[in-house]
Image (tube, helix red, strand yellow):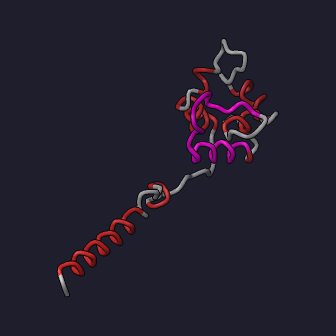
Amino acid sequence: MGPKMIKKTTLLFFSIVIYCLQGCYYDIEQELYPSGGCNTADMSYATDIIPILQNNSCISCHGDLASLDLNGYADLKVYLDNGRLMGSINHLNGFRAMPDNSPKIDQCSIDKLQAWIDAGAPNN
């Protein structure tokens, strides 16, 4: 095998290695290493739902002085019943995407809210 053939073989080998390594670039960490799932059983307004609304700035933007008030169970229930809350946080067509000018809140929080609503949205 001559020097030119060795150069070509080496170049081909490294090209294949680089090509194969590029396939890992688009992997999504959450899919490769799941965090153990999302527990949506027995959601409570006080211990599960309020923290989601607080941690995602829902209440700070939509509190007592806002035109759309989410500060309290009765106020929140209005937007649960008319579908606006879930439509907005899921960024569905026909709803204003919330949080405003931001990506959707994490899917586990959305799943917890939906599980709570599916259970009748109890004030617990």
State the count of labels: 0
Position above or below: 90 against 30: above
Give the camera-side residue of 39 and 58.
58
Give the camera-side residue of 23 and 99.
23
Farthest right residue in view: 82
Q: Residue at x 57, y 47 (%)?
A: 108
Quadrant position of residue 24? bottom left
Give the camera-side residue of 105 and 49.
105
Give the camera-side residue of 86 and 17.
17
Drawn side of residue 91 relative to residue 19, left or right = right
Q: Residue at x 60, y 24 (%)?
A: 59
Drawn side of residue 78 relative to residue 32, left or right = right
Screen quadrant of the N terminus: bottom left
Q: Residue at x 61, y 36 (%)?
A: 49
Drawn side of residue 82 relative to residue 121, left or right = right
Drawn side of residue 16 relative to residue 41, left or right = left
Query: Is residue 35 in view from this perspective?
Result: no
Q: Which residues are magenta?
A: 95-117
Residue 116, given in percent of the width and then of the height, sits at 68, 44
Residue 4, given in percent of the width and then of the height, sits at 22, 78
Residue 80, given in percent of the width and then of the height, sits at 76, 34
Residue 121, given in percent of the width and then of the height, sits at 73, 39
Position above or below: 24 against 117: below
Q: Residue at x 62, y 27 (%)?
A: 100
Query: Is residue 123 in view from this perspective?
Result: yes
Quadrant position of residue 72? top right
**106 in magenta:** yes
Screen quadrant of the C terminus: top right
**123 in magenta:** no
